[in-house]
Image: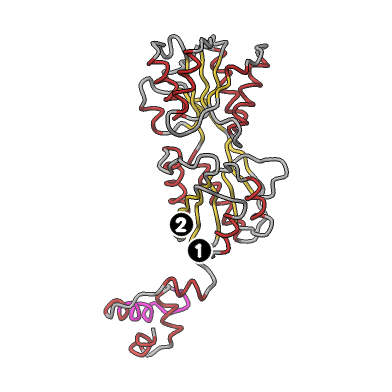
């Protein structure tokens, strides 16, 4: 920078401002300095500048996998969300740091914050990390979590209306004449527990008793959902509908049904959750609950940057919609 300043006959601070397109520097001077810099191969060391300014110009997007250590971030829902987060963050001229945390402990997020690798953090999913998120949020402001609002929550969260989504899915199956509906998914997790609660509410409102044999635990990964549905069929569990906690679980359920000679939707109707890209491309195409991923990403980033500016933002719950396709057609 001192060399460019000497060639241009200006101070180093003028060179710095000119290379940053600062409007206080006359246009002719800016152009001259920028041409000299380009000619002599000078570029700003962003890391050094950010260190001097105590900023990284980076937002970390972290995925804690305490509940599902084998889950990949190539999951269709994750990939779609990451793409929209990247668009929103880059529009604000920040870089993105992606962190996969497969074995989180109570202090993993505190260590990540202290590493000073990012100016703020978006945590994708609460997993089983509610206490760790609260611990970090008690002393760190620029933190926003994708998830449901929980009792005693300190951190700011943005998520879909999972309770309403579960209710919409079950009500649609009931309207279609289905009476014995499987719920398949990891109901112990935040967000999924609300989807199950919505399912229960819809059945109660319809005067149908809750049968715990119809609630099947299943992981998001591997053959868990396929195996659980197949075992239920083999055990003679009577059901004519399936509400799955994700689109991936729904498609595994359909494979298990087809392997057992059950037709979808003639014998069993199936509803998923997310409306990932695979939902419309599967055969049969998947009826599902749509989470508005672009809106979720925009809200997460907006909340985070408002918190970076010192605002104490409140948690937000975004609406969901029922998308009717072939696996559970309209009655």
Question: In screen coordinates, is 203 left or right of 270?
Answer: right
Q: Residue at x 51, y 15 (%)?
A: 241
92 vs 73, nearest the viewer = 73
Quadrant position of residue 73:
top left
Q: Mark 1 packing: few (<14 Cα in 10 Å), some, or many (20+)?
A: some
Instruction: State left or right for residue 164 relative to residue 4.
Output: right
Q: Position of residue 327 (x, y in %)?
A: 43, 18
Q: At 53% from the left edge and 24% from the top edge, which residue is drawn?
A: 184
Is 296 situated left or right of 6 in this image?
right
Q: Is disc 2 placed on a helix, strand or loop?
A: strand
Q: Which quarter shows the N terminus? A: bottom left
24 magenta-colored: yes
Please determine whether, in this image, residue 201 is positioned above or below residue 121: above
How would you classify the magenta stretch by its main secondary structure? helix
Name the residue tied to disc 2: 97
Task: Kindly report the distance in space between the C-alpha atoms of the residues bearing marks 1 and 2.
Answer: 8 Å
Residue drawn at x 47%, y 53% as measured from the top left: 99
251 in magenta: no
Q: Which quadrant of the view contains residue 130?
A: top right
Over which residues does the magenta segment extend?
22-35
Q: Residue at x 48, y 71 (%)?
A: 50
Instruction: Please give the residue where the numbered disc 1 appears in the rendered image.
Output: 117
Residue at far right of view: 152
Residue 50 versus residue 266 in the image, above or below: below
Q: Nearer the viewer, residue 27 or 76?
A: 76
> Residue 6 location, x and y as percent?
36, 90
Q: Earlier in the sequence, mark 1 or mark 2?
A: 2
Is 54 drawn above or below residue 36 in the view shown?
Answer: above
Q: Is residue 100 above or below residue 185?
A: below
Whether the residues at callouts 1 and 2 have beta carbons within 8 Å, the answer is yes
């Amino acid at each position: 920078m001192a060399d460019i300043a000497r060639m241009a006959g200006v101070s180093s601070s003028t060179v710095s401002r000119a290379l940053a397109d600062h409007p206080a520097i006359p246009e002719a001077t800016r152009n001259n300095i920028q041409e000299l810099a380009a000619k002599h191969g000078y570029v700003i060391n962003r890391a050094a500048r950010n260190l001097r300014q105590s900023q990284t110009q980076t937002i970390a997007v972290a995925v804690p996998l305490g509940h599902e250590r084998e889950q990949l971030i190539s999951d269709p829902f994750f990939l779609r969300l990451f793409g929209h987060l990247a668009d929103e963050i880059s529009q604000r001229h920040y870089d993105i740091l992606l962190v996969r945390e497969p074995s989180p402990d109570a202090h993993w997020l505190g260590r990540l914050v202290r590493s000073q690798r990012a100016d703020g953090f978006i945590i994708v999913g609460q997993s089983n990390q509610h206490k760790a998120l609260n611990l970090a949020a008690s002393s760190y402001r620029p933190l926003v979590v994708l998830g449901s609002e929980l009792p005693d929550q300190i951190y700011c969260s943005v998520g879909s209306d999972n309770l309403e989504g579960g209710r919409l899915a079950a009500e649609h199956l009931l309207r279609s004449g289905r009476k014995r509906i499987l719920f398949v998914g990891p109901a112990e997790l935040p967000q999924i527990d609300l989807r199950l609660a919505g399912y229960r509410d819809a059945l109660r409102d319809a005067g149908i008793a809750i049968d715990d044999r119809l609630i099947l635990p299943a992981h998001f990964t591997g053959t868990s959902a396929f195996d659980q549905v197949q075992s239920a069929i083999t055990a003679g569990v009577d059901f004519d509908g399936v509400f799955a906690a994700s689109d991936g679980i729904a498609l595994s359920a359909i494979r298990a049904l087809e392997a057992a000679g059950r037709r979808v939707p003639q014998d069993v109707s199936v509803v998923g959750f997310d409306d990932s890209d695979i939902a419309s491309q599967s055969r049969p195409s998947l009826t599902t609950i749509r989470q508005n991923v672009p809106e979720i990403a925009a809200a997460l980033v907006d909340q985070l940057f408002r918190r970076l500016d010192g605002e104490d933002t409140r948690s937000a719950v975004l609406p969901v919609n029922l998308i009717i396709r072939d696996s559970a057609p309209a009655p």
